[in-house]
Amino acid sequence: MSVFFHIDLDAFFASVEALDDPSLAGRPIVVGAAPGQRGVVSTCSYEARRFGVHSAMPISEAYRLCPQAAFLPVRMGRYAELSSRVMSVFEDFTPDTIRVSIDEASLDMSGTELLWGVPVRAAEAIRDRIRDEIGLSISVGIAPNRYVAKVASGTMKPAGLVVVEEGGEAEFMSGLRLKDLWGVGPKSRARLEELGVGTMERLLALSRETVESIFGKAGGEFVYEAARGIDPGIYASESRSRSVSSETTYERDVSDVDAIEGTLLGMAEELVARLYADGTISRCVVVKLRYGDFETLSARETRPEPFSGSSDVFEAARGLLSRKWDGRPLRLVGLGLAGLDDGSRVQRSLFEDPGERGARVERAGMDAARRGLGRLTRARLIPKPPGATPRKPS
């Protein structure tokens, strides 16, 4: 029997801030930028969400809704450090762990009962280790496939544990709201509601042909299968040893260049931190884009020499974005580094180039942050002056 866990770190960035500064515990926290500055919400605490704040929302709107919140900058190095520790715990329970993003993972726990007991007991053991060793909270979905496990993980946040038994996938999905159907955003739901399809019951009554006529072939196939608890293949089956990747699904489709590039920069820092920790290098960067209508594109760039650091990765990703993106609002942005190698066969230049110098500074900054000796902040992540307008693709 197949058993998959999908594990989300609850309000991860905000939870890390409260972990590092206990005076923030119980307060609304918004991570992204300072009030009056340009930027979007990266993550917010559950206390802030009760006021209507959500990720990808402009900071100005978040401040209007919740002026009493603590507004904090993104500290990607610190988040990546704790994320690596969390992922290491997951990998203690199963080597078949897909790191979906900095704050979530999909675990294949099939056949591990002799080691860890029944799935619920294994999930509780993972939850307890994350809480006791790292100080963070997780939500876990357990199901016979990765998609249903992901949906289940989000239905009882925070600190939830939801089990969907084999054969019960369709029944579980039928009891959800349309907004719980992962991958179906507000615009798609609005299109369904315009057609009188406002509930899962009504959606399930539609034929595959009807759903495909609404969303097109690819989008219709995704919605039709997802609504029935059939895994539409949300994670690429890439070898963990040869690639690392991360992706972000926005709560609202995003078309602001700065917000999208900020997402790519954060993921570049996350992935490079993982490479540093593993002692590996990469010569290939992959960018994944998904529009609101489910059209999904990808582009890659391969170089003869390895990337020297997150700035190098980000600039390559930025170039791929500018060439591939047509300006329509994006629902999902992903970044991957492929063709990983231990670097033993790389011929280093006799003369250090600026990229390598920058990489050494970056590694030193990450090491200092891990030892509590201070942090480096990228100039690009410093909020821009008030009154600046969002950039559109040129």
Image: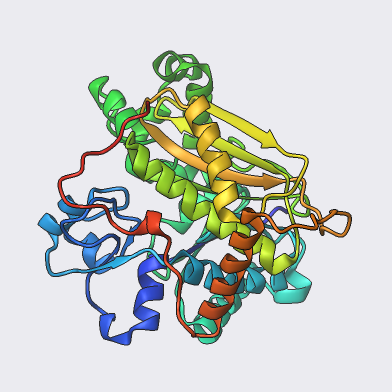
Q: How many marks?
A: 0
Q: Is residue 50 left or right of residue 144?
A: left
Q: Is residue 128 visible?
A: no
Q: Position of residue 61 (x, y in %)?
A: 16, 50
Residue at 32%, 52% in the rendered image: 55
Please state which of residues 95 and 114 is positioned toward the viewer in this rendering. 95
Q: Position of residue 103 (x, y in %)?
A: 50, 61
Q: In the figure, 372 relative to 208: above or below?
A: below
Q: In the figure, 250 relative to 83: above or below?
A: above
The picture quadrant where one finds residue 370 is bottom right
Residue at 59%, 77% in the rendered image: 367
Q: Is residue 182 left or right of residue 320?
A: left
Q: Residue furthest front?
A: 351
Residue at 48%, 40% in the rendered image: 333
Please state which of residues 144 and 253 is positioned toward the viewer in this rendering. 253
Q: Position of residue 268 (x, y in %)?
A: 55, 52
The picture quadrant where one finds residue 271 is bottom right
Indicate the quadrant containing the N terminus: top left, top right, bottom left or bottom right.
bottom right
Q: In the figure, 303 relative to 277: above or below?
A: above
Q: Which of the colour schemes (rainbow, by chain, secondary structure, one colour) is used?
A: rainbow
Q: Is residue 76 visible?
A: yes
Indicate the quadrant containing the C terminus: top left, top right, bottom left or bottom right.
top left
Q: Residue furthest right?
A: 345
Please state which of residues 319 and 285 is positioned toward the viewer in this rendering. 319
Q: Position of residue 237 (x, y in %)?
A: 71, 42
